[in-house]
Image: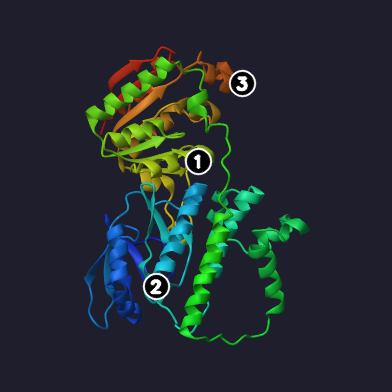
Amino acid sequence: MNSKTSIPEGTFRDPEGRLFRDGDRILREIYPQSASTVLEWLQSPLARRWMEQRRMVPTTILASEPGHPLLLEHERIFFPSYPWEWTPGQWIEAASLTLDLCEEALEEGYILKDATPLNILFSGPRAVFVDVLSFERCDPQSPLWIANAQFVRTLLLPLAAFVHLGWPLAATQQRRDGYEPADLAPFLSFVRRWRRPFRSLVTLPLFLEKISSAKVRPLKVSEEVCVFALRRLLRSTRGLLRSLVPSRHASRWSSYSETADHYEPSDHAAKRAFVRKTLGAIRPARVLDVGANTGAYGRIAAECGAEVIAWDTDVQATDIHWHAARGAGLPILPLVADFARPTPAVGWQNRESAGLLDRARGRFDCVMMLGILHHLQVSEQIPLSAICEQLWEISTRWAIVEWIQMGDSQFDEMCRGRQKLYSHLTEEYFVQTLSKRFAVRDRHQLHNGRSLWLVERIS
């Protein structure tokens, strides 16, 4: 394999193997000392069933020789995402899949040896387990699930901090191994520490930490007791997860589609009709919906046959979007992501987790930016030329853009009395700037003064 094309993709830390990309292929090398164990797992009926169900990433064995590395190829998931870009519902989904697979594996004599959200990717709205090195034969005499502590640190404690303390899930970007109970304890009152879920997640672990400094010999029990104890632990852990499902509440933008009084019903209908007609004509395979809100236009793109990635900064609106896409079975992946402040690359040498723009650049044959340009120009103060440049880098061909100029109620509200600063943002200026990178193919005027544009990328 050409080392120049081998790029760490997040699991080079694993002592048993490494993941790397070769062009558009996702390959995994399993080191010789672990090759036979992983091969046995991948060829088991359980692993094969999960791959057929697409609950675990479909994997092909490319090379398998005794004493040599095992070489695997994983089906590539179109747009990899990270836990710090997920909605609360997606966190719950990832945690539930982890517990589901662990319970099912236990029935076949296997156990999950690590349990982190980084083992999960989303294909459309569905969670997929991608780390095939995470399962091993269960010790029939050990009642301990070693991965439980990691599951608590990386999944349950971040959810508890979000639901009960208001800590953003996005903050986990800087906490690869999650939170420790001691991280949350200073923010809990005495009474709260002894209530569910913090009694189990924070208070008792800290207490046991203080009294268990002595070295403890591994506990050995019968196989029946082992299985019973592990099942009980998994049920208890699932109960804690259920207690962390956040209640739904409205945010500033989560009911925008219903409350946007600057759109008449006829404007909404005309906008949907233009988007549907346009997508039906250009037939994009992959669409990026920027500023997707709860997904009205992303759903139209999916219904027209496209795979959709949807970005929005509002957590509640994006969560509503994800639940709707999952319920309808549509190929849409909503993410909490910001076009103006894209997720940066993080990890070792900034190469473990790719930045948002690196993942998006040149990947979409159509980008929709509906009702977002004025936010970027006024609230974020990003020059129109820079927005067009970034749009050109992401789209391989088409863009559908909504233009909003001064006089629009939302535009004027965002100006906060600084209309003079933005007086140059006329439709003429928009066309002049856009035309440096795109050719106009269609335009539709809405009754409320806004206009919709189909433009094609100039190579």
For label 2, count other residues whose C-alpha is less than 10 Å away and answer few (under 14), some (14-19) or many (20+). few
Count all numbered tags in the image, as a single digit. 3
What amino acid type should be assigned to the residue bearing mark 1?
Answer: Arg
Identity of the residue drawn at 77% across and 59% down:
190
Horizontal and vertical percent for residue 325?
Answer: 39, 41
Q: Using residue 325 as the reference point, say whether residue 411 is left or right of it.
A: right
How far apart, in angstroms, are the residues tagged by discs 1 and 2? Answer: 45 Å
What amino acid type should be assigned to the residue bearing mark 3?
Answer: Arg
What amino acid type should be assigned to the residue bearing mark 2?
Answer: Glu
Q: Pointer 2 and pointer 3: residues touching (CB < 8 Å)?
A: no
- Is residue 39 shown above or below 267? below
Give 453 or 382, whichever is nearer the viewer. Answer: 453
Helix, strand or loop for disc 1: loop
Task: Kindly identify which residue carries mark 2.
Answer: 107
For label 3, count other residues whose C-alpha is less than 10 Å away and answer few (under 14), some (14-19) or many (20+). few
How far apart, in angstroms, are the residues tagged by discs 3 and 1? Answer: 22 Å
Give 259 or 336, whichever is nearer the viewer. Answer: 259
Identity of the residue drawn at 34% across and 44% down:
329
Task: Kindly identify which residue carries mark 1.
Answer: 341
- Is residue 112 shown above or below 395? below
Task: Kindly identify which residue carries mark 3.
Answer: 416
